[in-house]
Amino acid sequence: MSKTKETRSPAWLGAAALTALLTGCSKAVVLNPAGDVAAQQGQLVITATLLMLIIIVPVIILTLLFAWKYRQSNTEARYEPEWHHSTSLELVIWTVPLLIIIALGALTWISTHKLDPYRPLDRVSATKALDPNVKPLEIQVVSLDWKWLFFYPEQGIATVNEVAAPVDRPILFKLTSANTMNAFYVPDLAGMIYTMPGMQTELNAVINKAGEYKGMSSHYSGAGFAGMTFKFKGMADEDFAKWIAAAKTEGKPLDAATYLNLAKPSERNPVERFSTVDDGLYNKVLNRCVEEGKMCMHHMMAIDEMGGEAYIKAAGLNLPQDVCTVQNADSVVALLDSQRAQAAAVVQ
């Protein structure tokens, strides 16, 4: 018997150590983040867990108590084989869980709206109000195979696998994907948000502590998924200005040809910086028309809204059945632009 215990004890210790390692107890980022939005989400997890423990803990205690009290050797325990109902127990069993479910439902409903990723921030942190004169930093995000491309429209730069933002300044992420559906996630910053081709999602967040944090793809997207990580840097205002200046000095231009080469599948890309970006490149990526002569999705949708093929024929364009070809895209787009200009002139 002693030999069995000696061989099994190390196995149990190893399992406990592995469990601790897998649960990430060395740094529980979700419960100790550096951004206010993530902090509120972490607090929601804690509150919900505590509410559920109101039921879980008594049930565990009573299960152990009943097993001990009504053990076979305890002949003094009450024995009532005909017992089948107790109004008091029924009230406790149904009322307490019902109240907890109501509390959880109310908490979830409020938090779902308050922490909506599309909703602009109403505070910088729990102790700092939002300055209405501060403009959010806009960062446009494109998930590629298998790397992340970040546009800074206000600063006129772009980066690959590295993104930075000033501490305590609201950030507005606008996200899309070049090809495969993906998910943008910085645990210290905010919750996960999906990126999808031809669509744009948004995420409002803020970082409250300077430092370097890990960003990742949290949605499997193919062979290079494991290496699809990036660095998120929280910086003081002056350090952020230096970072922008370094990108403008050290980087290279990002035009359509460079982007198309960058968009080719590759794994574990190093950090890259681009000093300038072609006007409207992000919108072309969003509308899937970076290639020369390819019609953009918003032009296609405008044609469909106006009547599709019937509208094209009524406008006098003698086009083939597929109006969205490289050969005829320019003429259709020119027609749409001219009609919009006419409509704007009429309104004015």
Image (cartoon, rainbow, N blue to C red):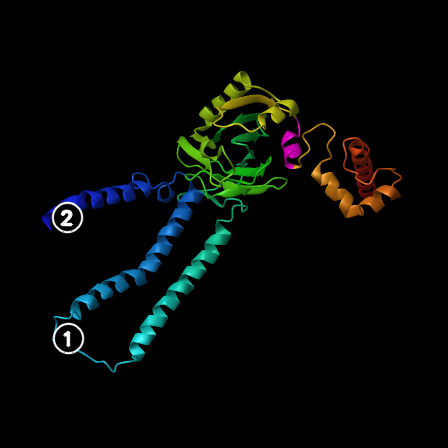
270 or 88: nearer the viewer? 270
Q: Residue at x 54, y 38 (%)?
A: 172
Residue 232 located within the stretch drawn in magenta: no
Which element is circle 2 on? helix
Q: Which residue is mark 1?
A: 77
- Quadrant location of residue 236? top left
Which element is circle 1 on? loop
- Quadrant location of residue 291? top right
222 or 286: nearer the viewer? 222
Residue 166 at x, y percent in the picture: 47, 31
Quarter of the image that includes the C terminus:
top right
Q: Which residue is mark 2?
A: 4
67 relative to 238, above or below: below
**Any part of residue 168 in sight:** no
Q: Identity of the amino acid at label 1?
A: Ala
Residue 168 at x, y percent in the picture: 45, 36
Q: Which residues are magenta?
A: 279-286
> Which residue of the protein is positioned furthest toward the top in this rendering?
249
277 displayed left or right of 229: right
8 or 239: nearer the viewer? 8
